[in-house]
Image (tube, grey):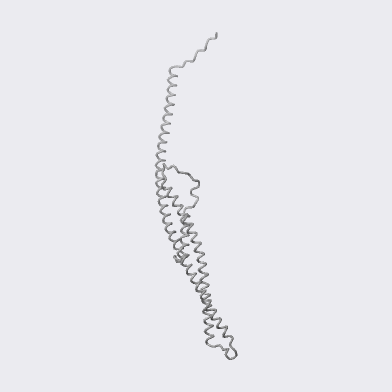
C-alpha cells in the first residue's frame, strides 16, 4: 500500500497570526455593523422628526384650507341667494312692463279710431283743429311709451338670461366647494393608524392659486350682474 502523505503542519506563530487575522476581521465587521446601526438609528430619528413636523404642517394647512373653503361657501351662498332674488325681482319688473305695454294697446286703438273717424268729415268740416292736434300728440306719447316699455322688456329679458348663467356657475362652484370641503375635512381627520389611506398620482395637477381665482371670479361676476357691486 502507498503511504499517506503527511499533513502540512503550521507553526504556532502561523496559528496565532491566523487567529489574529480572523479576530481582527470580525472586529472590523462588528465595528462596521455598529456604525451602520448608529447611522440607521440617526436616520430613523431624523426621518421620524421630519415626518412628524411635516404632518403637523400638513394638518395646519388642511385646517386653514377647510377654513378658506367654508369662507368661500358662505360668500358664494350669499351671492347665489342675492342673484336668485335679483332674478325674481327682475322677472316681476319685466312682467309689470309687459302688462303696462299691453295696457297701452287699447288707448292707442281708441286714439287711432278717433283720428280715422274724424277723417270722414266732408268739405269745410274737414279741418285741422286743436282736437286733431291733441289726438296726434296723445298718439305720439302712447307710441313713445310703448317703445320705451318694449326696450325695457328686452333689456330685462337679456339681463335675466345673464343672471341665470351666473346662477348656474355659482351653483356649480358651490357644489364643488361642498365636495372639496368634504374631502379636506376627511383628510384632516386622517392619522397614521387610519385604514382608508390611499395614494393618488399627480396630486398637484391644479396650479397654486387657481382654486382661489375661480370662485373669486364667479363671486365678482355674480355681484356685478346682480347690481350689488359697482362696475
Q: Position of residue 83 (x, y in %)?
A: 46, 63
Residue located 44% across and 51% down the image: 182
Quadrant in the picture for residue 177: bottom left
Q: Is residue 24 above or below residue 226?
A: above
| Residue 42 or residue 194, whichever sits in front | 194
Q: Is residue 105 above or below residue 176?
A: below
Q: Is residue 52 above or below residue 34?
A: below
Q: Position of residue 33 (x, y in %)?
A: 42, 31
Residue located 41% across and 33% down the image: 37
Q: Would residue 125 appear left or right of 57 to someone viewing this image?
A: right
Q: Quadrant of the N terminus?
A: top right
In the current view of this chain or complex, which residue is farthest to the bottom? 124
Q: Position of residue 218 (x, y in %)?
A: 47, 60
| Residue 221 or residue 78, whichever sits in front | 78
| Residue 65 or residue 28, whichever sits in front | 65
Quadrant in the picture for residue 115: bottom right
Q: Position of residue 99 (x, y in %)?
A: 50, 72
Amino acid at each position: 500500500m502507498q503511504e499517506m502523505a503527511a499533513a502540512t503542519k503550521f507553526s504556532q506563530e502561523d496559528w496565532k497570526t491566523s487567529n489574529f487575522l480572523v479576530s481582527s476581521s470580525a472586529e472590523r465587521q462588528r465595528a462596521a455593523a455598529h456604525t451602520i446601526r448608529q447611522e440607521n438609528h440617526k436616520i430613523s430619528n431624523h426621518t421620524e422628526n421630519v415626518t412628524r413636523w411635516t404632518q403637523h404642517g400638513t394638518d395646519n394647512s388642511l385646517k386653514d384650507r377647510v377654513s378658506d373653503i367654508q369662507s368661500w361657501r358662505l360668500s358664494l351662498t350669499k351671492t347665489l341667494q342675492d342673484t336668485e332674488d335679483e332674478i325674481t325681482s327682475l322677472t316681476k319688473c319685466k312682467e309689470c312692463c309687459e302688462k303696462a305695454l299691453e295696457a297701452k294697446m287699447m288707448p292707442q286703438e281708441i286714439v287711432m279710431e278717433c283720428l280715422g273717424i274724424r277723417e270722414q268729415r266732408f268739405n269745410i268740416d274737414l279741418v285741422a283743429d286743436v282736437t286733431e292736434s291733441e289726438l296726434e300728440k296723445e298718439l305720439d306719447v302712447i307710441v313713445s311709451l310703448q317703445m320705451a316699455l318694449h326696450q325695457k322688456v328686452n333689456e330685462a329679458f337679456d339681463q335675466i338670461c345673464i343672471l341665470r348663467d351666473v346662477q348656474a356657475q355659482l351653483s356649480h362652484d358651490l357644489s364643488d366647494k361642498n365636495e372639496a370641503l368634504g374631502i379636506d375635512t376627511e383628510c384632516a381627520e386622517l392619522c397614521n393608524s387610519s385604514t382608508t389611506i390611499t395614494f393618488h398620482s399627480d396630486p398637484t395637477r391644479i396650479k397654486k392659486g387657481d382654486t382661489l381665482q375661480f370662485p373669486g371670479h364667479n363671486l365678482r361676476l355674480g355681484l356685478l350682474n346682480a347690481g350689488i357691486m359697482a362696475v
